[in-house]
Amino acid sequence: MANSAILPASQLATANITRSKKTMPNLANAKKALRQSDKRAQRNKIVRAEIHSMRVKLRKMIDAGNAKEAQTVAQVICKKLDKAEQKKVYKKNTVARYKSRLMKKVNAITKG
């Protein structure tokens, strides 16, 4: 009750979240699971960031009108997206949506 008197409701909610994040597991297997989860999250974050930057690069190429370069970058992105799907970084439908949108833009620039 002392916390609710000092902090507003919005800050109290965030205070509870940060407190629960700082607690460490007691069991050895739970500690190991937490370490593994952190490592996987870090790896997934790197893969997502790489794909995101490549998608931005492709959009800039499309805007500039570089059809040949856009096609090669699109192939690389599709390959990386498929690999990320295999590793369960992205879901199947998310990868399909990204690939569909990218290829639609690339095909429009090559035909036009």
Image (cartoon, rainbow, N blue to C red):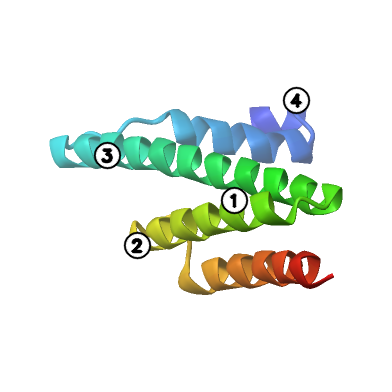
Q: Which of 3 and 78 is in front in this view?
A: 78
> In the image, is residue 94 above or below residue 12?
below
Using a 10 Å C-alpha cutoff, classify the residue at mark 3 as few (fewer than 14 neighbours), some (14 to 19) or many (20 or more).
few
SS at mark 1?
Answer: helix
Using a 10 Å C-alpha cutoff, classify the residue at mark 2 as few (fewer than 14 neighbours), some (14 to 19) or many (20 or more).
few
Q: What whole-number distance in Å separates the C-alpha atoms at marks 4 and 2?
A: 49 Å
Instruction: Tell which tag, 2 or 3, sits nearer the viewer.
Output: 2
- Name the residue carrying label 3: 36
SS at mark 2?
Answer: helix
Amino acid type of the residue tagged 1 in the rendering: Val
Query: Residue 86 — which label?
Result: 2
Q: Earlier in the sequence, mark 1 or mark 4?
A: 4
Instruction: Tell which tag, 3 or 4, sits nearer the viewer.
Output: 3
SS at mark 3?
Answer: helix
Instruction: Tell which tag, 4 or 2, sits nearer the viewer.
Output: 2
Residue at the far left in the pictured view = 28
Instruction: Tell which tag, 2 or 1, sits nearer the viewer.
Output: 1
Amino acid type of the residue tagged 4 in the rendering: Ile
Q: Which quadrant of the view contains residue 109? A: bottom right
Residue shown at the point (22%, 34%) measured from the top left? 26
Amino acid type of the residue tagged 2 in the rendering: Gln
Q: Which quadrant of the view contains residue 112? A: bottom right
Q: Which of marks 2 and 1 is nearer the N terminus?
A: 1
Q: What whole-number distance in Å separates the C-alpha atoms at marks 2 and 1?
A: 20 Å
- Name the residue carrying label 4: 6
Residue shown at the point (71%, 45%) measured from the top left? 56
Amino acid type of the residue tagged 3 in the rendering: Gln
- Name the residue carrying label 1: 73
Q: Which of 12 and 88 is in front in this view?
A: 88
